[in-house]
Image (spheres, coloured by chain):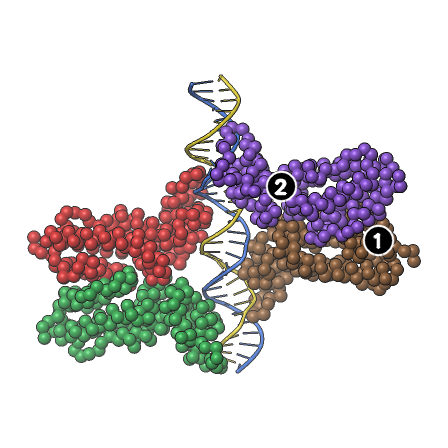
Chain colours: A green, B red, C brown, D purple, E blue, F yellow
Amino acid sequence: MPAASPQSPRPRSGSRRDESARLAVLHAADDLLVEHGFSGLTVEAIARHAGVAKQTIYRWWPSKVEILLDTLIEDSEKRLPVPTEQPPTAETVRGYLRDVERFLTDDPAGKVLLTLIAQTQHDPATATRFRERYLGPRRDRERDLLTRGIAAGAFAPELGPDATMDALVGPIVYCALTGASIPAGLVDTLVESLLRPRPS
Amino acid sequence: MPAASPQSPRPRSGSRRDESARLAVLHAADDLLVEHGFSGLTVEAIARHAGVAKQTIYRWWPSKVEILLDTLIEDSEKRLPVPTEQPPTAETVRGYLRDVERFLTDDPAGKVLLTLIAQTQHDPATATRFRERYLGPRRDRERDLLTRGIAAGAFAPELGPDATMDALVGPIVYCALTGASIPAGLVDTLVESLLRPRPS
Amino acid sequence: MPAASPQSPRPRSGSRRDESARLAVLHAADDLLVEHGFSGLTVEAIARHAGVAKQTIYRWWPSKVEILLDTLIEDSEKRLPVPTEQPPTAETVRGYLRDVERFLTDDPAGKVLLTLIAQTQHDPATATRFRERYLGPRRDRERDLLTRGIAAGAFAPELGPDATMDALVGPIVYCALTGASIPAGLVDTLVESLLRPRPS
Amino acid sequence: MPAASPQSPRPRSGSRRDESARLAVLHAADDLLVEHGFSGLTVEAIARHAGVAKQTIYRWWPSKVEILLDTLIEDSEKRLPVPTEQPPTAETVRGYLRDVERFLTDDPAGKVLLTLIAQTQHDPATATRFRERYLGPRRDRERDLLTRGIAAGAFAPELGPDATMDALVGPIVYCALTGASIPAGLVDTLVESLLRPRPS
DNA sequence: AAGTAATCGAGACGGTACGTCATGTCTTAGC
DNA sequence: GCTAAGACATGACGTACCGTCTCGATTACTT
């Protein structure tokens, strides 16, 4: 559904930031990315699609990457939360990895994530912002998850928490990036082999 | 080193394809990618840098992605060959993974590989060509490597050869993509945990 | 003198059409035509010379021919008006023909006229536009001039007004096109022979 | 009819100039001019159309204008000869003017003539060559025609022979250039008014 | 008869200009 | 003060021709 419908034009806002314009932009960006890919995601197209002036976009976002970061952060807070159970078990981690798998393959927001990972390769500024606003904070919570599990004796990975997380998530992201379907049993085997759960 | 020096103009070749022009383009593309990133990699810049007419590029390459594919294929044949030892051992695979690590972190051609993986997320045509020309053939040889090792009893992974390869390579690529340094011990642990080498 | 001097950049105009850009383009086109001929009159050169973006030209003019038409119409309204005296005499027509002669040989805008006549031979679309915007309206006023003179009994041409006008103007244009100087007495003889003035 | 038919390729010529290639080029130029106008008359199109290599054209003609000059000269020698009757009468001149009218309006070669007149406005080199090779020689014969008629007492123009010729031919060319049909009675009136034939 | 030279087709080459598109900055005018 | 609208300079896109060049085959003059 297009963000801007002709029959109900968004009322002009006046002097404070227009929340409906903000949402229209985020949704338009999402729609365009899914429909036409990153190449079709031009600022002009977003503006047209959102029924918003280009300048309104440039006023609030320094680049279209930041728009995508905004949508990604909002969406993945909701649909890919890092588990906070106390204490976490191997099953907790396994569930999270399955969520990551589902997010990357089925959720439109997963496409945003993959697109941003891709864009970090093309532009160092994107890389920095992506780490600062998404990867870093998420990794903090992931690290905490593993650390608490280890402390509770739920599992005992050979590697440190960060390296373990890379080893667990890396294959899933890699399959998603290369367009391969995630092999059945991959997540289970990764958890068994790398996390080394302790029998409860 | 620039491919075209003003004082010694490349001799016009005549009616057959000009090999020196081809090399100048490949080197210019490589240089520009490393120096200025993918955004600085415009066809016009390549042409300027290589001392070549734009049309010469469009005559032989349908897009700048194909230029990068050409450089990647030539470079990774030379500097990242899939081992062909008979029979392969766990050590063979470990060595290959270390080569992948080195290729991605130290070799300029590694940047080309990461860039192309990224570009596949932005453009489906690139994804197809990248799989056809690079990923597919390489994966065939990698699968063969694992299959032969399993047959020889050198290792016994839980997963099938393709999934095992994804699980081994995925973390390395993921770290490279996110700009993280590859954790010490990662390769060793992956091999031990996922490949499950048999004592010889 | 170039239309755009670096030390005094044209102020950006904003959301309405930039009149100074329009004039800069018209003058640049004129200058380039006179200095370098029609071959030197590329859109890129006009843009460079006028200190204007190519897109600004394409936004307002569908082709460089329309630019020339604009300059021609503005200039020939000013410097080659069709006489409107009431009633016109043979002397009025003779004066107009001398103005045509002077316009074609001495005025820079005359070169624009000759260039456009030439371009109509190369491009049917130009021919149509040239007739619609220049030749037609002018011929209407010329026809009116002759018709009024005939009605007033000032002259009595054998041919109809249009044919008479062709017979009077044709030789002047032909000489200008072939680069020949207009022969002395040509205008007088044409008026005497073809217009057949009545003694007052 | 195309100059080069696929089923009967022109035999390669060998060491002397290939007459059939020359004719193929001239015909292709003519065809392309008539069909697609001067803009469609590119050297590459001529070469393609004539089944000839571009270099073959550049070997023998310095520019496409010279190709057109060649066709024009050959055609107008045949189909628009300057009368050589001794002595010429007013009727001779009238007949020649009618031939000019027919040539410009009905003959494909007339389009070549108009195109070249046009091109002289765009390129001074063309102007020079056109005068040297076409206009000059033809005017010499036209001048001779009038001079002989005057000497024989057949007519007595007010103006000199050159100016008279301009006054006679100018209107016809002007009408042809502007795409107007030549008005009925124009030629007759021009002859009567400007040539002033003497009763025999 | 062999060697030389000129011609031909084909087409690659370094260029210039084309007309289109998206970028990010700016101004105007309405709310 | 924010908005929609949109003009603007910039610069890359991919295409079409330009005029020069080199190739290998073909043919005719020269010795």
In depth, the one of A168 and D8 nearer the eye is: D8
Point 45% across, 68% down: residue: A45
- Is residue C174 visible in this depiction of the protein? no
Q: Nearer the viewer, mark 1 or mark 2?
A: 1
Q: Is residue A145 above or below residue C25?
A: below
What is the x, y in percent for residue A36? 39, 65
Q: Is residue D9 left or right of residue D67?
A: left
Rendered location of residue C34, percent (x, y): 66, 51
Extreme residue in the right direction: C200
Cα gap from disc 1 to disc 2, whole angstroms: 38 Å
Foreground residue among A14 and D192: D192
Disc 2 marks which residue? D68
Q: Is residue B188 above or below residue D49?
A: below
Circle 1 Cα neighbour tier, 10 Å, few/some/many (<14 / 14–19 / ≥20): some
Kind of residue sitting beneath label 1? Glu
The residue labelled by disc 1 is: C158
Along the horizontal axis of the image, is A183 left or right of E20?
left
The three-letter code of the residue at mark 2 reads: Leu
Left or right of C181 on screen, residue A21: left
- The quadrant of the picture occupied by the C terminus of chain C is bottom right
Measuring 48% from the left and 73% from the top, which residue is drawn there? Answer: A53
| Residue in the image at 54% along x and 35% along y | D21
Rendered image quadrant of residue A110: bottom left
Element type at mark 1: loop
Q: For mark 1, name the chain.
A: C
Neighbor class of circle 2 (other Cα within 10 Å; few <14, some 14-19, many 20+) is many
User: x%, y% of residue A81?
Assistant: 26, 75
Q: Is residue D138 visible?
A: yes
Along the viewing direction, whichever of B5 and A90 lies nearer the viewer: A90
Task: Where is residue C9? Give x, y as percent.
Answer: 58, 62
User: Which element carries disc 2, helix, strand or loop?
Assistant: helix
